[in-house]
Image (tube, rainbow, N blue to C red):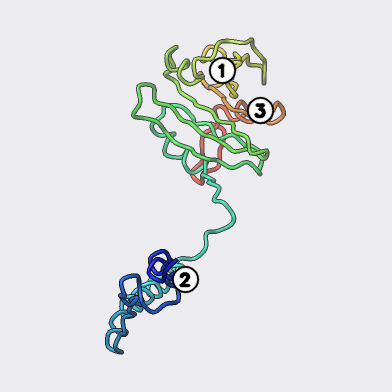
Amino acid sequence: MNEREHDETSEPEPVGRDSAEGPAGVQDEQPVRPQLTPAQSRRLSQPMVGILLSVLVTVGAVAVLMLMNPSPDPEPFTPDEDVDEAAGPVADVAGYAPLVPQVPDDWTANYARWKGGEEVPHWEVGYTTSETAFVGFAQTDAANPTWVAQEVDQAPEAGTITREGMELTIRRDEDADREHFVLDAEENDVDGTTVIISGDAGDAEFDAALRAILDGLGESPAADGSPSAP
């Protein structure tokens, strides 16, 4: 083999990766890192400073509002209406003595009001018992079957009981959690009013409510708010 043939068959030397030149003798270009001037750096940092200032101002405003508003009272508010006082003016318009029953001292009155603007004007009071149950009553001298049905939530009759010598009709819906006792005007030989006692209390508290309410029939509030016999 001559020298020429040897030159034609020999392979070219590979170009190494670390070579400064590329395949065509082009020099590899290194990425250019931009150089920021101090002024440019300050301009770029200004938005971040503004965000931090805004966050600090917001946190400060929230802290001030929390300090200005006192913490809520941990003891929940329990309404306690003065039934004696509320019954005073009712006696002048109702036409009968509004009931002011002497319930246990640890019961609180949720409401005591005269519903004079309704089709059947009536006096109503509701209590929270010592066991945090509810017992209330509605009293009127103008009852009709529709009003009674509304007051007992359409509950059907479920028997009768006798308290203080008067017979009351039990109205109970087995699917509901309330029980109702209806003293019809015909059974009320004290003042002739119809009284509906309703609630979800236990038997002992319900019995205490029934006796207090029936004992209070016919007693008019005195000038000082306390009940007195007519």
Name which residue type carries label 2.
Leu
Query: Quadrant of residue 147 in the image?
Result: top left
Q: Give the mark, 2 or 1, whose residue is nearer the N terminus.
A: 2
Neighbours of disc 2 within 10 Å: few (<14), some (14-19), many (20+): few
Give above or below for 20 relative to 108: below
Neighbours of disc 3 within 10 Å: few (<14), some (14-19), many (20+): many
Residue 162: image x %, image y %? 67, 15
Give above or below for 103 relative to 171: below
Query: In which quadrant will I find the N terminus?
Result: bottom left
SS of the residue under disc 3: helix
Q: Nearer the viewer, residue 85 or 73?
A: 73
Name which residue type carries label 3.
Phe
Provide the residue designation for mark 2. 67
> How far apart are the alpha carbons under marks 3 and 2?
46 Å
Provide the residue designation for mark 3. 206
Q: Give the mark, 3 or 2, whose residue is nearer the N terminus.
A: 2
SS of the residue under disc 1: strand
Q: Nearer the viewer, residue 1 or 7?
A: 1
Residue 56: image x %, image y %? 40, 75
Q: Nearer the viewer, residue 24 or 129?
A: 24
Residue 50: image x %, image y %? 33, 76
Give above or below for 144 relative to 100: above
The residue at the point 42 percent across, 13 percent down is: 146
Residue 74: image x %, image y %? 58, 57
> How far apart are the alpha carbons under marks 3 and 1?
15 Å
The residue at the point 51 percent across, 34 percent down is: 125
Relative to 127, 140 lies left or right = left
